[in-house]
Image (cartoon, rainbow, N blue to C red):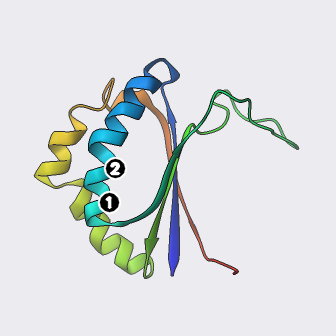
Amino acid sequence: MLFEIRQYHFNPDLFQAYKAWAKTEAIPHLAKHIDVLGFWVNTNDAPEVRGEPQDKLGSANVTWIVRWRDLAHRNDVLPGVLSSPAWNDIFTRVPGGIDSYHRRESKFAESLL
């Protein structure tokens, strides 16, 4: 199994609207098509950061995790999900549009448990 950890730095001024959009539109659609293990948004509590300082964006404020068989499976399935007419329609309503994503990151992990 491969786990994709997706993290977004979304515009904090539109964060409440984003949470409503994600909960009512994005998550239900994505969960029908891919194995979304969880979808989290930051609370108002300050993050704990140790070591080197972060850049001006700070911590990502949205994190979600998807389970895949392997990277080939992800690369085969995800582009179709994110380019489908249904997703394109949903994405037209993301608060502030694509420019509200100040950074989008994906990293891949394996479980040690």
Q: Residue 76 in the image: x percent, y percent? A: 29, 74
Residue lying at the far left of the rendered structure: 85
| Residue 110 figure quarter | bottom right
- The residue labelled by disc 1 is 31
Label 1 environment density (alpha carbons within 10 Å; few <14, some 14–19, many ≥20): few
Residue 27 is labelled as: 2
Q: Residue 42 in the image: x percent, y percent? A: 59, 36
79 to 102, vertically: above or below: below
Say what amino acid the circle numbered 1 marks.
Ala
Q: For this view, does 82 lie left or right of residue 58? A: left
Residue 100 is labelled as: none
62 to 66, vertically: above or below: above
- Secondary structure of residue under mark 1: helix
In percent of the image, x 15 and y 41: which residue is there?
Answer: 89
79 to 56, vertically: above or below: below
Q: For this view, does 12 lie left or right of residue 52? A: left
Between the C-alphas of marks 2 and 1, the distance is 6 Å
Residue lying at the far right of the rendered structure: 51
In percent of the image, x 20 and y 34: which residue is there?
Answer: 92
In percent of the image, x 38 and y 79: which residue is there?
Answer: 72
- Secondary structure of residue under mark 2: helix
Q: Residue 104 in the image: x percent, y percent? A: 48, 44
Q: Residue 81 in the image: x percent, y percent? A: 24, 60
Say what amino acid the circle numbered 2 marks.
Ile
